[in-house]
Image (cartoon, rainbow, N blue to C red):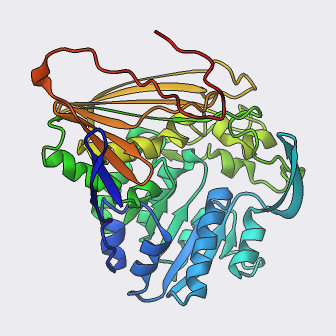
């Protein structure tokens, strides 16, 4: 249930009931910007057999492949038609030693392990390919899942629309605003469906919060805040595996870089002369600015998306964002600390912060003249505010967030 409270929970609202939708309506709705197992199952159960392909077969794609395979096993009318990745791939088991423990892990990523998992013939170069353009040429393909490094999202989305394919795109949608405008315009003229994989928007909490705000629960929503924080001694994204099998012979480095492709007249990535083959750049690309914006694009995108949905705002009128590399000086070229302020024409401000060097959280809230919405696990609380009482000093948040440490002192 969703709980609403005025300093303490006082009422409960039921979760919105799920109802079957046809595929195009589901993918076209702003409220369903992600694939949840239950929701996707309902959608596909009412349609003919849908041909899918996976472009980019790393960790995110493996989760999607596993989900689709489960739907197929449950009798859903789906078929995996093709997989595409620039790396031959690797399937094995290995040990990870960290935090005083050794964990045995199974690893299966890249082109040929994904083909095996999907029941495709590795020798079929039309359906098991390193070149995504071959994949888009397939006549029995309806939709693609684009789960590549960020710098490829815009180009592949444009090409998917040109080929008449619906597209599910891992966030961020594109790397630049220019790419986003071009992709949106292509989508509008195509009659196709594009879905951005912000899974948390499948949760009705955010729509319930929007309805509460629209109903005047907290007055005008003037300020939102959100953040995401991580802390790993190995360095954020540096724990992604570096395998000896990642070599210039097994990786199509030119295709990975994308320097021969462009969007809006700009090449997607650097040339091999600027960026020679480096397995750490390939496997840990989120650490490098030509391919990722680090915590801004990889960590903050879901938070910003759902807060924008809850506040009911649209495009910002201005955005100020700064990133700094303060601690994780391990060769990465993306920041480890990000602060963002976006102002919207509807009269609201959204503040966001991200850090990969601290796990202490920031409250996720939307403030209004008459109250504040605070998001918690499973729902949100509302707290009343009374501007008629005058400019008083509010109580401080004295109870610390428990990260397993001890409270050793108090501040006055």
Q: Is residue 201 visible?
A: yes
x and y percentages locating residue 198 in the rendered image: 45, 54
Would residue 387 be found to the left or right of residue 185 on screen?
left
Dividing the picture into quarters, in which one does residue 337 lie? top right
Dividing the picture into quarters, in which one does residue 208 lie? bottom left
| Observer-nearest of 154 and 66 | 66
Would residue 373 be found to the left or right of residue 334 on screen?
left
Q: Is residue 277 visible?
A: no
Residue at (48%, 39%) from the top-left corner? 300
Residue at (28%, 55%) from the top-left corner? 207
Classify 121 as above or below 169: below
Would residue 290 be found to the left or right of residue 394 on screen?
right
Would residue 285 be found to the left or right of residue 261 on screen?
right
x and y percentages locating residue 118 in the rendered image: 68, 78
User: Which quadrant would the N terminus be assigned to in this image?
Assistant: bottom left
Classify 166 as above or below 389: below
| Observer-nearest of 226 and 330 | 226
x and y percentages locating residue 283 in the rendered image: 74, 46
Residue at (86%, 50%) from the top-left corner? 243
Classify 391 as above or below 269: above
x and y percentages locating residue 100 in the rendered image: 87, 41
| Observer-nearest of 63 and 56 | 63
């Amino acid at each position: 249930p969703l709980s609403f409270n005025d300093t303490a929970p006082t009422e409960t609202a039921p979760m919105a009931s799920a109802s079957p939708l046809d595929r195009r309506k589901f993918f076209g709705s702003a409220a369903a910007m992600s694939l949840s197992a239950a929701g996707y199952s309902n959608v596909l159960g009412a349609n003919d057999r849908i041909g899918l392909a996976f472009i980019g077969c790393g960790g995110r794609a493996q989760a999607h492949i596993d989900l689709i395979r489960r739907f197929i096993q449950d009798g859903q009318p789906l078929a995996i038609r093709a997989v595409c990745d620039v790396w031959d791939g690797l399937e094995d088991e290995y040990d990870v030693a960290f935090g005083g423990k050794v964990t045995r892990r199974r690893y299966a990523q890249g082109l040929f392990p994904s083909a095996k998992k999907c029941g495709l013939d590795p020798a079929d170069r039309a359906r098991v390919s390193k070149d995504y353009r071959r994949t888009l040429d397939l006549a029995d393909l309806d939709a693609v899942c684009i789960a590549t490094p960020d710098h490829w999202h815009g180009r592949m989305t444009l090409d998917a629309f040109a080929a008449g394919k619906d597209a599910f795109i891992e966030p961020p949608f594109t790397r630049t605003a220019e790419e986003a405008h071009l992709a949106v315009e292509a989508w509008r003229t195509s009659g196709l469906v594009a879905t951005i994989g912000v899974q948390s928007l499948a949760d009705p909490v955010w729509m319930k919060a929007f309805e509460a705000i629209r109903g005047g629960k907290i007055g005008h929503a003037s300020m939102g805040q959100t953040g995401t924080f991580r802390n790993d001694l190995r360095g954020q994204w540096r724990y992604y595996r570096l395998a000896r099998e990642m070599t210039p012979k097994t990786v199509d480095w030119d295709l990975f870089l994308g320097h021969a492709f462009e969007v809006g007249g700009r090449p997607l990535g650097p040339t091999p002369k600027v960026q020679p083959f480096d397995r750490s750049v390939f496997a840990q690309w989120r650490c490098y600015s030509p391919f990722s914006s680090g915590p801004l694009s990889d960590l903050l995108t879901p938070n910003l998306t759902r807060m924008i949905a809850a506040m009911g705002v649209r495009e910002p009128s201005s955005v100020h964002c700064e990133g700094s590399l303060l601690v994780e000086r391990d060769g990465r070229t993306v920041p480890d600390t990000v602060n963002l302020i976006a102002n919207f024409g509807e009269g609201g401000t959204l503040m966001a912060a991200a850090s990969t060097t601290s796990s202490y959280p920031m409250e996720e809230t939307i403030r209004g003249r008459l109250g504040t919405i605070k998001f918690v696990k499973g729902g949100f609380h509302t707290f009343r505010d009374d501007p008629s009482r005058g400019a008083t000093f509010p109580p401080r948040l004295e109870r610390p967030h428990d990260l397993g440490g001890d409270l050793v002192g108090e501040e006055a």
